[in-house]
Amino acid sequence: MAIKKLVLDYDYDFLLIGILSSVPDYKLCWGINKVLNIVLKKEQDLELQLHDKEMNDGLKLTFDKPEMTPRYSMYTYYNEVTHLRYTVASNRSVSGLLIKEEQSVDFFLVVDGLYDDLKKGDSIVNDLRKQREIITAYKIDPNNLKSKQNLIFE
């Protein structure tokens, strides 16, 4: 009997913006709300279910204890008119980075849904850069990230 394997491939077709900021998450989201005219709300922290993690020095960390589970702050807003979902997720927790390839990024802004306008993406980045709370912001291609599966929030 032949064995069939089901392979799920996620769609990484969304606008991803890396944000560098030294302010707390709630203050950053307040600034994003002002500039994008949205209302981000605090959600339950994103928890990555990891069992073992190899550190840079070859040591292994075990995440069997709940207090060791990496948790990342998350805020969301869904616009029912444009059908766009805005998600702000922190890149840092006490246990490590959400996206290791982007070590300088403090937060990610993910805009997904029926999003096709690349010019609007540039406009969002430019508006974010004007905020006092944000040091800089830039677009990132999620398809070039090895740990892009961490950006699928369901």
Image: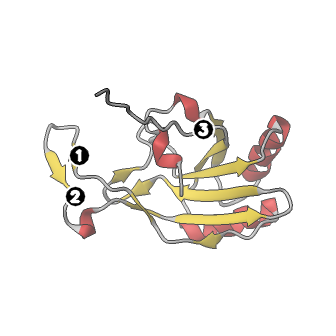
Residue 141 located left or right of residue 35 = left
Residue 6 located left or right of residue 112 = left
Circle 1: residue type: Lys
Residue 46 located left or right of residue 52 = right
Circle 3: residue type: Tyr
Cβ–Cβ below 8 Å for labels 2 and 1? yes
**Disc 3, SS:** loop
> In which quadrant will I find the N terminus?
top left
- Circle 1 Cα neighbour tier, 10 Å, few/some/many (<14 / 14–19 / ≥20): some
Q: Position of residue 121 (x, y in %)?
A: 77, 42
Task: Name the residue tied to disc 2.
Answer: 63
Which residue occupies 63% across, 52% down?
109
Find residue 36 and report its image quarter. bottom right
Task: Name the residue tied to disc 3.
Answer: 12
Q: Earlier in the sequence, mark 2 or mark 3?
A: 3
**Disc 2, SS:** loop
Which residue occupies 49% across, 64% down?
73
Which residue occupies 60% across, 38% down?
12
The residue nearer to you, when weighing 102 against 6, is 6
Is residue 36 depicted above or below 119 in this figure? below
Cβ–Cβ below 8 Å for labels 3 and 1? no
Find residue 21 and report its image quarter. bottom right
Task: Name the residue tied to disc 1.
Answer: 53
Tell me which colouring the rendered structure shows. secondary structure
Inter-mark Cα distance, 3 to 1: 25 Å
Q: Which numbered mark, 2 or 3, is in the foreground of this view?
A: 3
Q: Earlier in the sequence, mark 3 or mark 1?
A: 3
